[in-house]
DNA sequence: CCAAAAGTGTTAGGAGTACACCCATGG
DNA sequence: CCATGGGTGTACTCCTAACACTTTTGG
């Protein structure tokens, strides 16, 4: 696509996080067209007339994955004049969190291929998408401690060990099991469901749900998740 | 100015905070042209070709105030399709903090008038600028606790009481003097200078400077300013 | 000597962290 | 009965918050 000189185009790009086998992954698409044909890139596209930024991000997200009701948040806008060789393109980056059981990858039009990558093992990306991804990871790590981010990455029902693994995978360090459980107990944001998960040859784990109402009350009081 | 259909324009708007008489103020300009002629608005303007977003924000800031070396941070991008009656205008909002002794308002071309407003007593604003301002205030309050924001609003040398007033004016509540001073002492980010400020008929106050290097070390360790 | 802000210490309660063993289950 | 992750309590340290009086100065 050609862009006239002095004309500004606006895109949205989305960093879509999810957990695969207890590790944080990002969805990338392989570009089927120039520039950067064959390179991996963040899913995204131009904002349409009459479409809000958030709506554009939601649309792109839906086109790549079949999910709805996802956590979606605006990350940052990137507008260096030379970030796109086609001309002046400003991008508004979003990041999305998808529960690990809710992912269905769809065939896409622009992208020849779409794949999940472990954030610890990323390829070289098109445009300035490497920078965008690095920034979103930093933001995610900061958000662990005062938002519901970890719960967005899990299915509705989860075990305490699964929850702890989410915290550990985002923070990048191990946490003490007893301290973790005591803190969750103290915060009182988990509701046990009368069910267990039996997985192979070991003691079944109690399942829990996140109590969003309780969390909102804590947030109003300034009580958070300090790890 | 007319904008063709389906064409996107990008502006930057800046929320410029400063302290006047121990109260948090924002710089607003009265619009000299339609739309919203005569209404107060955030300073801002179109991003020029070949100019990065941050550079555009810096330029606008310089056009309104004579300051340099200010704290400038991207806030959020607003892009609802109907936020500007002239057509599709996406704005990237920034916020800036200016030390209270460094402000020189300049005559501007687009704006008939520029004035500081107490954030507790704001007029109705043009476009969606009321929303942008509300959001920047929320962000500022969140940032108090883990950034150098309060120091950016003070001159190089300041008294402990002045610093405490900055925290109080942003947080919107009173702090205990002894606890405040002990915490600053413990954090070890203030350096006394061998000078005092004598102001009228009372005991002079010791002047201090902020030690940015020390703060960086604390930030790396995750030690912050919890109030 | 008076008014006004500067400056200073102690205590009690709560949260964070470090640490090791028994429990329940399926095969 | 064994392998595997599930589940639990205690002790110490440190930070937070509540709280009131003396000091220094200019007029």
Image (cartoon, coloured by chain):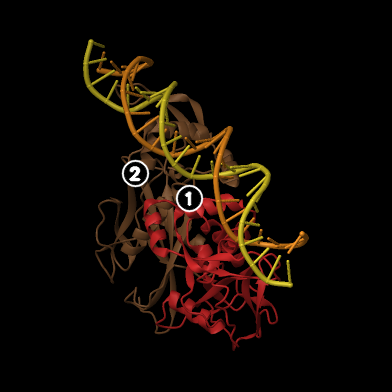
Chain colours: A brown, B red, C orange, D yellow
Q: In the image, residue A148 lies at what x, y percent?
A: 49, 45
Residue B127 vs residue D2: left or right? right
Q: Nearer the viewer, residue B199 or B43?
A: B199
Q: Quadrant of the N terminus of chain B?
A: bottom right
SS category of the residue bearing label 2: helix
Q: Quadrant of residue B25?
A: bottom right
Kindly check if marks 1 and 2 are in contact, taking CB atoms under 8 A apart as contact.
no
How packed mark 1 is, by other alpha carbons closer than 10 Å (few <14, some 14-19, many 20 or more), is: some
Front residue of this view, candidates B132 and A224? A224
- Picture layout, residue D4 above or below residue A162: above
**Residue under pointer 2:** A169
What is the CA distance from the residue labelled 1 to the residue labelled 2? 18 Å
The tag earlier along the polypeptide, 1 or 2, is: 1
CA neighbours of label 2 inside 10 A, class few (<14), some (14 to 19), many (20+): some
Dot label at residue A61: none
Q: Is residue A162 positioned above or below A67 on the image?
A: above
Q: Is residue B216 above or below residue A89?
A: above
The foreground one among A5 and B128 is B128
Q: Left or right: B66 with respect to B29?
A: left
| Residue drawn at point x = 43 percent, y = 47 percent | A144
Percent of width and height locating residue B219: 40, 56
Residue A190 seen in render: no
Residue hosting label 1: A71
Left or right for A35, reference B5: left
């Amino acid at each position: 696509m050609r862009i006239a000189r002095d004309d500004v185009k606006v895109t949205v790009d989305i960093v879509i996080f999810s957990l695969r086998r207890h590790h944080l992954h990002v969805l990338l698409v392989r570009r089927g067209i120039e520039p950067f044909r064959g390179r991996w890139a963040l899913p995204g596209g131009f904002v349409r007339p009459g479409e809000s930024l958030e709506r554009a991000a939601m649309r792109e997200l839906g086109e790549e994955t079949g999910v709805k009701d996802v956590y979606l948040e605006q990350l940052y806008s990137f507008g260096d004049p030379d970030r796109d060789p086609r001309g002046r393109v400003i991008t508004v980056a979003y990041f999305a969190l998808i529960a690990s059981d809710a992912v269905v990858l769809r065939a896409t039009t622009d992208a020849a291929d779409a794949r999940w990558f472990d954030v610890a093992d990323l390829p070289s990306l098109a445009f300035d998408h490497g920078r965008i991804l690095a920034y979103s990871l930093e933001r995610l790590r900061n958000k662990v401690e005062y938002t519901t981010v970890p719960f967005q990455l899990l299915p509705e029902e989860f075990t305490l060990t699964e929850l702890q693994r989410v915290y550990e995978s985002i923070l990048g360090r191990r946490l003490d099991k007893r301290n973790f459980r005591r803190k969750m107990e103290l915060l009182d944001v988990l509701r046990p469901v009368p069910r267990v998960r039996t997985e192979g040859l070991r003691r079944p784990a109690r399942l829990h749900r996140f109590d969003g109402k309780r969390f909102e009350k804590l947030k109003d009081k300034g009580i958070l998740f300090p790890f």
